[in-house]
Amino acid sequence: MDEVEALRATLLSAIEGASDLAALEEVRVHALGRKGQLTERMKSLGALDIEARKAMGVRLNAVKDDITTALAARKEQLGAAALNQRLAAERIDVTLPVRPEQEGRIHPITQVIDELVAIFADMGFTVAEGPDIEDDFHNFTALNIPPEHPARQMHDTFYLPPGPNGERKLLRTHTSPVQIRTMEAGPPPYRVIVPGRTYRVDYDMTHTPMFHQIEGLVIDTTSHMGHLKGCLTDLVRAFFELEDLPTRFRPSFFPFTEPSAEMDIGCSRKAGELKLGQGGDWLEILGCGMVHPKVLELSGVDPTRYQGFAFGLGVERCAMLKYGIPDLRTFFEADLRWLRHYGFSALDVPSLATGLSR
Ligand code: DAH
């Protein structure tokens, strides 16, 4: 075997022997690289005379072709083998049981807000928001709350230190100021709900300094008390998932509505146990009324053309009633055991289409 044949045999067997892609690349550089064996042989052609150069050139080129072909073939082989190995190693057995990982829970307040928003969205409401830090005008004055009203007292409301102009901002005591902000922002009609945090100086079994409300506002030219009753009756029946839940509207007073009402839902209290539905007893659930003409006027809406209703309900109260949570304060104690017990799965997104129950 002459030298060229020997070179070809060595290189081919090195290619065959390369056990992975990195080794194969090494062989390639060794043969065809700038200082590779075959490359060096080609460079030395210049020293030969013309006939010999021609003959040797043809042979070396043939070797180069063979080596190139062999390299490509082996590369494909090794690549496929590597892929197969990875596929085998990364195989997932989808029949294995899920690893027991701790899943986070949705807080009942978030859950109940989502449920209520889903119901209102079905009725054509959109969600509006406003600031937690309010001014006196939006929280009180524009809502027709008189200067001597107890809610304005220092001991009921969290006031901030006075600003440069002496004005004292406050933590909103209800979501009602967003009624005003909605009306200031553009012309009627309005059909909005406002979920949000509210603050009062209070702390016992049924009061916490921060709690949540959902405000509602419907204003157009024709909305009347019948719409208010129908809308809120549909709401509580959908929310509590009781189609025949009795409702009752009792006359009441709020400065920002006229007439004002409180809505009760039917229940029974037997042996100290509360059960929603028919039963002869009543439970107060929310405040509502026809928006006072003065409130419309103070918000820049013409009360001779427009009218409508508003309502406000407590989110925690709704959560406690629907899911049997006894103590309001536990909502804010950040106790993981409590959250695991009363919380909801994140995968269980409420919507009217899929049903609201767990
Ligand atoms: N803002 C009232 C409260 O916090 C609740 C309320 C009552 C809101 C009647 C309303 C309403 O919009 O019409 O006690």
Image: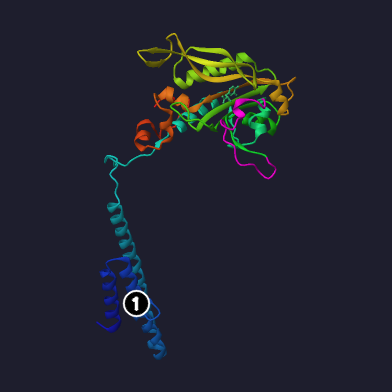
In which quadrant of this rendering is ligand 1 seen?
top right
Quadrant in the picture for the N terminus: bottom left
Residue 13 at x, y = what percent? 26, 72
Task: Say if 50 sits above or below 237 in the image.
Answer: below
Q: In the rendered structure, does residue 80 fall within the stretch colored magenta?
A: no
| Amino acid at pointer 1 | Ala
27 lies above or below 107: below
The residue nearer to you, when weighing 285 against 333, is 333
Q: Is residue 270 above or below residue 217?
A: above
Q: Is residue 181 visible?
A: no
Is 7 placed left or right of 269 in the picture?
Answer: left
Describe the element under mark 1 as helix, strand or loop. helix
- Magenta segment range? 146-166
Task: Judge from the rendering whether residue 37 lies leftward or rightward of residue 120; answer left or right.
Answer: left
Q: Is residue 158 magenta?
A: yes
Q: Position of residue 237 (x, y in %)?
A: 48, 18
User: What residue is shown with label 1?
Assistant: 31
Counting from the top left corner in percent of width and height, residue 61 is at: 38, 77
